[in-house]
Structures are given as structure tokens and as C-alpha cells.
Amino acid sequence: MYKPSSLFGSSHAAWLLFWAGLLLLSVTGFCPRPISFANVGVNQCRPSSTLFMNKRGPSFNSCEHANEVLELAVDNISGLPPNQIAAVWSFVSRLMAKPQRRGGQNKAIRKEDHEKLKRQIMTVLKNTRQSTKKMRPKELTTITLGMAKIVKYVRDGEQSRRLNANQQVFCSVFLDDKANLTASIFQPLTKRANDILMEFEPRYLSNLAYAYALLEYDPKLDNGSTLLENIAEASIDVIDQFNAQGISNSVWACAKLEVSHSAFFRAVGDAVVRS
């Protein structure tokens, strides 16, 4: 766990402002959770079909299970634009947490079905990696957050031994080889996000930080900095545009990943006082 002195050094005033901000956030009921993208049609419980159904791709609205989303995505893989790739991971992460029918939680699946699902996951992951250079902040954030939720879900389920057969397949892809997870899956997303970080709106900055905190992973960049340090730096000039939930997410993510960025925390404290 981080220590206040490591965040602020000798700046006692900034330390007080930071903790005053956290106290205010706790009193007002804000706790870390992703900011809804409802206004842009990405993170709704049932997204508008106008975003996900067009001449170039399928609609995932009728899918009831994560494997159905992946099957539909693979069937249309050559025509999936970045916004629909984002939709795939958003739907998969949400449907994986959907309550199972009684008696179906631990139902075994055939080995060939297991291998088919694994191939589908790997196919969509490959397509995601290949498309990162075309992605904009909203798509990068949605994909990273969706994958982070999957990782957290299967990690927690593995520890409690409550994964069903399909979820165990996701576990075998995302958790069995942790080096592959960070290098192969998230490295291209990290590089692209860092390259265009100054284009991110506040809600995307805070949700991206939140996603990597869920992963418990702060990618190190070629220049020696980390992605969360750069997100904190990019957030300073737009901190007054963050809502309370965005500030809560960002502060929690930095604390979770032990990111020491005194200028960011001073800016947060000042913004909370001004509000």
C-alpha cells in the first residue's frame, strides 16, 4: 500500500487537500467504477443497435452468452471496424458475469467445443491487436476495460472455484500464461493509448486508469515511465473537467498501482476544494 509521504514528499498542504478530497468523495457516495458511456452508445446495458448494426458488421444485441458474441464476431471478422471490436469485448465482459441458469453453472462441454471457443477468443484477440493503430480513445478504453473485467472475473472465479466450463476457457487464455497476457494482449493497446493520450477526454483517462488498476498492471514504457504516470500527467490540465466519479476512479487507480505523482494529487486536491 502506498504511503502519503511517498506521494507528496514534503508538501503538507497537498497531502491535506488530497485526503480532504477523498473524504468528500466518500461522503458523497462515489466509489471506483467505470464512467458510463451511455451518451456515446458504448457502455449501456443494451446498447443502441445503431452503433453495432450497420452494413459493415453484425449486431450483438440478441446474444445471450459470451460464446455467441465471439462466434458472431469470428463469422464477420474480416469486416469488423474498431468500434465493433470494442463492442465485442464490451458485450463479452458483461455477458460473462450474467447469472447462469440453475444446474448449468458447472456443466461440462465437449473437448472440441472447448477448443473451438479457445480458437474464437484467439482469433478476436489477433484481430484486436492488428486493428490497434486505427483505434481512437473511446475504442481503446472500451476494449481495455472490457478485457480487464474479463481478467478480474476469471481471476476471482478461479480463486473461488466458481467458473463454469466456458469461463474456464477464458481463464486458460487470459490467466494461464501471464507473460503472454501482458506482452501479447495489452502491449499493443498500451502503446497506442500512450501515443494518443493527449486526445483522451477526461472520462476516457479515468476509465483507462481504472481498467489497468483492475488488471493490477501498470505497463512500463520505453522511456522508463509507466502508462499510469502518463495518464496522471495528462489529467492535470483537464482536471476541472473530471466529474466526481472520474476523480474517484483516477485516485483509486493510482493508489492501487502505487503511482507516485505529486503534481497530479495536488491538482486533484485543488479541484476538489474548488468544487
Image (cartoon, helix red, strand yellow):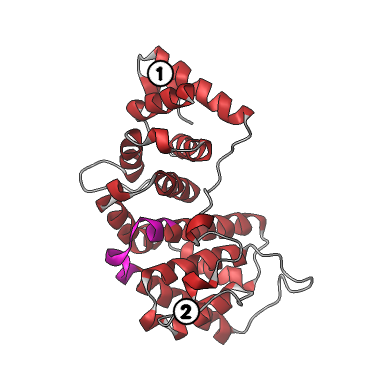
Label 1: few (<14), some (14–19) or many (≥20) C-alpha neighbours in 10 Å: many
Identified by mark 2, the residue type is Ala
Q: Position of residue 119 (x, y in %)?
A: 46, 80
Q: Amino acid at mark 1?
A: Ala
Q: Secondary structure at mark 1?
A: helix
Q: Which mark is residue 270?
A: none
Alpha carbon separation for disc pair 2 and 1: 48 Å
Q: Earlier in the sequence, mark 2 or mark 1?
A: 1
**Which residue bears the numbered disc 1?**
14
Assess whether mark 1 and mark 2 are in contact (beta carbons under 8 angstroms). no
Hey, which quadrant is residue 67 in on the image?
Answer: bottom right
Q: Residue at x 44, y 18 (%)?
A: 15
Please tell me which residue lies in front, 113 or 204.
204
Q: Which residue is mark 2?
A: 73
Does residue 181 show up magenta in the picture? Answer: no
Label 2 environment density (alpha carbons within 10 Å; few <14, some 14–19, many ≥20): many
Please state if 177 lies on the left or on the right of 169 as rendered.
left
Q: Nearer the viewer, residue 54 or 234?
A: 54
In the image, what residue occupies the spot 33% across and 26% down? 263
Which residues make up the magenta segment?
129-141
Where is residue 71 shown, x and y percent of the image? 52, 81
- Number of numbered labels in the structure image: 2
Tell which of 119 and 143 is nearer to you: 143
